[in-house]
Image (cartoon, rainbow, N blue to C red):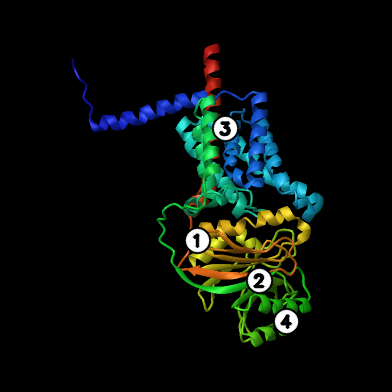
Amino acid sequence: MQHRTWNIPQLALLIPQWFNTRLQSLHFLGSAALTKSEAFLWLLAGMASFHAAYVTPAAGGWLLLTYLTLVQLTRLEPGRTSFLIGCLFGFSLVAPQLSFFFNIFSWAAVPLWIVLSFWFGLFLWLGCHMRRQFSAWAFVLTLPIVWLGLEYFRSELYYLRFSWLNAGFTMGLHLPGGLLQMFGVYGLGMMLMLLACLLSLLRREAMLVVTALAMLAFTASTRDWSLPSKIGKRVPVRSFAVAGVQLEFPTEGEVMRSLDQVLLKQPDAQLIMLSEYTFPGEVPEKVRAWCKTNHKYLVAGGKAPTANGDYYNTAFVIGPTGETVFQQAKQVPIQFFADGLPAEKQMLWESPWGRLGICICYDLSFSRVVDELVRQGAQGILVPTMDVMSWGEYQHQLHARVAPVRAMEHGVPIFRVASSGTSQLVDSKGRVLAAASIPGDGEILGGRMTIVSHGSLPFDRQFAPATSAATPLIGLLALTLRKRKSTEAVETRETCSS
């Protein structure tokens, strides 16, 4: 019996061929066009799992089914219909979760919901073209890139950017902290989309069983353990006592009485923080005198006027001498609000305890703002926040997800004081050590903030901006291949008819 021998170059060629053949056969199983009933059932499943993931903390892993729904919907015929279905699906996800937009913007909330839904329609439209024009392995590898590119762009880069509705702010809060530290909020979404793409290659029965098992595994996971870090061990440097008071548009007298209450309830507090827009201008002289009398540091929100009559939404740091020792303006003013000019620069406060960064309210929602502070060496972050009670309790609950996620991502503690909840003291692992209630007017919270030797950036920050640039190129390639195939088909028909 003659045995066939193989050399390494031959194997190097055969292994990719074998892998591609298997992927092609698997891809064929999931490439049949969706029927109307199948599409409707997937839409219902994806919508239900998304809202369950946000409303029920234990169901964060159910978000996988929403991502799998998006992948399955790429089996629709590419064109206007797929785009509209994607927009409709996005609207069913966005509008209920952001219903508080109506409290803030009234009927102007509807076009804002539509704008956010547009990105789902664009993703699905591109995905339908990619599924038909790319090979199986190319589709599996590029669809997560397109998802990341679109999500990063809509969350961070353009004027109407909004970042709250992503995988990091749902699953990230219930998975081991090391995952967010490793992948980041956007990288976690990309990995979830990659998993959904791989699941879609299986036969329907196997796909549903494996998806259910994965969702159960995500649900059963716990943040009590973390993955080994390759970024370097963060060493606690020192701790200091902090305290905050929830006050919404207070008078100067109310501020003074609340500060006196802090001395009674948190006498050891070395740094006291008030919310964004505590004062209509700079910090009043009476408050400065209180800091000097009681030898306390105070962080409070106010307005720094400009020469042309405008202002910067600013966090002022008043020292024990009563003087302003540091101030930082808001980096990302809220769109459509009178929220001042964007800050011209970001700097760190060289505090007596370490290097502290300041994000003002909405700033914390954007990774690019926090990333810059961490690059400069921030060892902790202070966040004076304005959450108006009339915006609704659910808005406060969604906003309260941001601080723990950022602390887990960057590995730095965060002290956030809001006007009407939810104020939080969060350690460098994302654990909430102290919190105040909603609305909690005049409520005081305190504890010890332990700063670390350094923070770090998750891996997605290295490539997420590049994917936003690559996404239109991938889409252009898919459309070019479609046009070429259409031209070849027309030429073939003409040849056959002649």
- Circle nearer the N terminus (3, 4): 3
Question: Residue 154, labelled with which disc?
Answer: none
Q: Are marks 2 and 3 in contact (CB under 8 Å)?
A: no
- Circle nearer the N terminus (2, 4): 2
Residue at coordinates 66% horizontally, 29% vertically from top-left? 41
Q: Residues within 10 Å of mark 1 (few under 14, many from 20)?
A: many
Residue at coordinates 79% horizontally, 54% vertically from top-left? 103
* Residue at mark 4: 284
* Residue at mark 2: 244
Q: Are marks 3 and 4 in contact (CB under 8 Å)?
A: no
- Circle nearer the N terminus (2, 1): 2
Give the residue type that dot 3 points to. Answer: His
* Residue at mark 1: 411
Which x, y percent locates residue 129? 57, 32
* Residue at mark 3: 129
| Cα–Cα gap, marks 1 and 3 | 40 Å
> Of residues 204 and 213, which is closer to you in this image?
213
Give the residue type that dot 1 points to. Answer: Gly
Residue 343 shows in this picture: yes
Instruction: Say which of marks 2 and 1 sits in front.
Output: 2
| Cα–Cα gap, marks 4 and 1 | 35 Å
Which x, y percent locates residue 292? 64, 86
